[in-house]
Image (cartoon, rainbow, N blue to C red):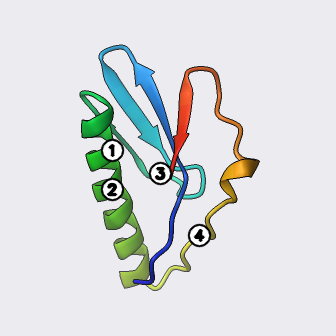
Amino acid sequence: MKNVVFPALFELDGSTVSVSFPDVSGCLTCGNDYADALSSAEDALNLMLTRMEDEKHPLPTPSDPSSIRPGSGQVLAL
C-alpha cells in the first residue's frame, strides 16, 4: 500500500472520543481519550484500506484538509 494521509474528525462524545474519516465511508472508531482514539483510528483506517486493496476496490482520494469544515465540537487531524 502506498503512503497516503486521510483527514480524520475527532469528537468528544460523552466519555469517549469518536473518530470518522470523511473520505472513507464506514470507517468509524472511538477511544477513551484522544490518545486512545488516535491509536484506534490508525488501526481502523489501516484495516479498512488494506481490505479495500485486497478486494481490488479503488482507494478513495484524500481530501485537501483545508476543504473540510469540522462541525461544532469536532477537531480535524491528519
Q: Which residue is mark 1?
A: 38
Q: Separation of disc 4 and disc 2 at Cα?
A: 16 Å
Residue at the (44%, 52%) spot, across then down: 27
**Sooner in the amino-acid sequence: mark 1 or mark 3:** 3
Q: Separation of disc 2 and disc 3 at Cα?
A: 14 Å
Q: Is residue 37 above or below residue 49?
A: above
Q: Amino acid at mark 3?
A: Gly
Q: Separation of disc 3 and disc 4 at Cα?
A: 12 Å
Q: What quarter of the picture does the N terminus occupy?
A: bottom left
Q: Which residue is mark 4?
A: 60
Secondary structure beneath dot 4 equals loop
Would residue 69 be found to the left or right of residue 21 on screen?
A: right
Picture disc at residue 42: 2
**Sooner in the amino-acid sequence: mark 4 or mark 2:** 2
Q: Is residue 59 above or below residue 20?
A: below
**Spot occupied by residue 77 in the image (x, y as percentages of width and height):** 51, 45
Q: Residue furthest top?
A: 14
Q: Nearer the viewer, mark 1 or mark 3?
A: 1
Would residue 25 be found to the left or right of residue 33 on screen?
A: right
Secondary structure beneath dot 1 equals helix
Q: Nearer the viewer, mark 3 or mark 4?
A: 4
Q: Are marks 2 and 3 in contact (CB under 8 Å)?
A: no
Secondary structure beneath dot 2 equals helix
Q: How packed is label 2: few (under 14 Cα within 10 Å), some, or many (20 or more)? A: few
Q: Are marks 4 and 1 in contact (CB under 8 Å)?
A: no
Q: Amino acid at mark 4?
A: Pro
Q: Which residue is mark 3?
A: 26
**Spot occupied by residue 15 in the image (x, y as percentages of width and height):** 30, 16
Residue at the (72%, 49%) spot, across then down: 66
